[in-house]
Amino acid sequence: MSWIDNIETVVFTIITGDNKSYTPKWKNATKDVEYNASIFEFVEVEGSLVVRKKPKGRRFDLEFYFDGENAIDLGNNFETSARNSRNWTIKHPFYGDFKCQPLSLKQDNSALNISKFNVSVIETITSKYPTYTPIITDRIEEQLNITNENQIQALSDSKELDKNEMLASVNSMDTTFSNIITSSEELLEFKNLVSEATTEIGLTISTATSILQSVQSIINYPATIEQTIEARFTAFKEVYDNLIMSFTNNKNQFEALAGGMIAAMQFSSSNNINDSYETRTRVLIQQENLINTYNDYVEFLDSLQTDRADSDYSYIPNYIGQESLNTLMNLASSNLFEIAFEAKQEREYILEDDNNVINLTHRFYGLDKNDVNLNKFISVNNIGLNELLNIKKGRKIIYYV
């Protein structure tokens, strides 16, 4: 139907929260639509990356009138009905039917025989929110367990396991991971896992499943230690690179160990223990590192794949294991994107005059009783003793917003 037909057939109606129906005369209403969006800026890239999410509720500015000898009474009755906190239902010739809540209401009885209203309403959803959804970190940990099980099963099915190479890999992990564990309690727990895995590898009755389960415990442990995201990733990447450099021809074993390392990296990225994700830049760098390492792993497996699968020397990556690892990668990357959406953005400012840390901290963060912001400002900008009292003009200052 045309807009003219809508005006002739659709009666402008407001059903207030007390379920009373009003049909005043109306003028054209304006409609505003805003979107949930975030803007990402990169130092070496011109322009901005705008990530737009779902639209917010539509906003309408309504103008309508009650007229006639009962105009004042009708207007007052409407104002009383508007006090009910339940949703309104509006039927509008131009905008259709929608549920809404009034944000402001203005009643004007200055003209004779007319009670004029200006009402701003915003469309509301009717579902009860927030609804329960699984915490993303729980989903990532669950997918990690699934991925580990699939990789263990794939290696067990292949019956291809070199104990000497496995022991060498464990020793490499022990050296690298021990260097980033700062807590004596965590280090002791990690060393116990290494000892258990070493013992399991040496047993004559051990199986591929039992050995890889013990080694997976070593691989996953650093993902949750008291350490920065960057330090954990660097350690995982070092072990991963060592696996590639020491690779001989045991393809299934490499797939399981390196795949386990990639999975642990992804799980580690969801454990922001030491506030590594304070800024968007740090989050996006971590996301890029994860994606690049995962892609490198997939490309390396692809280079190992043989054309045929019907000989003793053939190799094709395990589909189930790789599918679950890809799912984990998507979850971890998506989680980082959501974190970046909420994270602070790094800004730079060049001092126009000499200044000091107290004034600058107050300007960019505000001062606090425990000097948390002051210490953060000093740390972020690498303020040394010679700059504590006076920071020279032209100095670049970094702050987060």
Image (cartoon, rainbow, N blue to C red):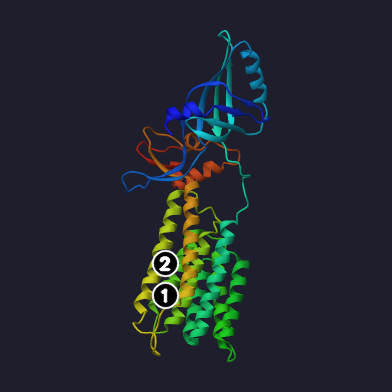
Please give the label number shown on residue 55: none
Q: Residue at x 59, y 60 (%)?
A: 138
Give the structural element (helix, strand or loop) at label 2: helix
Mark 1 lies on a secondary structure that is: helix
Is the residue 47 above or below the residue 243 in the image? above
Please name whichever residue, 246 or 111, is drawn nearer the observer in this view of the structure. Answer: 111
Q: Amino acid at mark 1?
A: Asn
Q: Which residue in the structure is indicated by mark 2?
A: 294
Q: Residues within 10 Å of mark 1 (few under 14, many from 20)?
A: some
Residue 339 in view of the camera? yes
Rendered residue at 42%/82% (across/down): 251
* Quadrant occupied by the N terminus: top left
Query: Does residue 181 show up?
Result: no
Residue type pointed to by label 2: Tyr
Q: Which residue is mark 1?
A: 242
**Residue 98 appears left or right of 284:** right
Q: Earlier in the sequence, mark 1 or mark 2?
A: 1
Label count reads 2
x%, y% of residue 49?
A: 38, 46
Answer above or below: position of 46 versus 286. Answer: above
Q: Position of residue 84 (x, y in %)?
A: 68, 29
- Image position of 389 (left or right of 131): left
Distance between the Cα atoms at labels 1 and 2?
A: 15 Å
Please identify the residue farthest to the left as the structure is shown. 46
Q: Residue at x 48, y 55 (%)?
A: 336
Q: Residue 261: x, y in percent?
A: 48, 71
The picture places residue 72, in percent across and down from the top left corner, at 63, 13
- Number of other residues with Cα within 10 Å of mark 2, as a class: few under 14, some 14 to 19, many 20 or more: many
Instruction: Point out the frontmost of discs 1 and 2.
Output: 2
In the depicted structure, whether residue 284 falls above or below residue 393: below
Q: Quadrant of residue 240?
A: bottom left
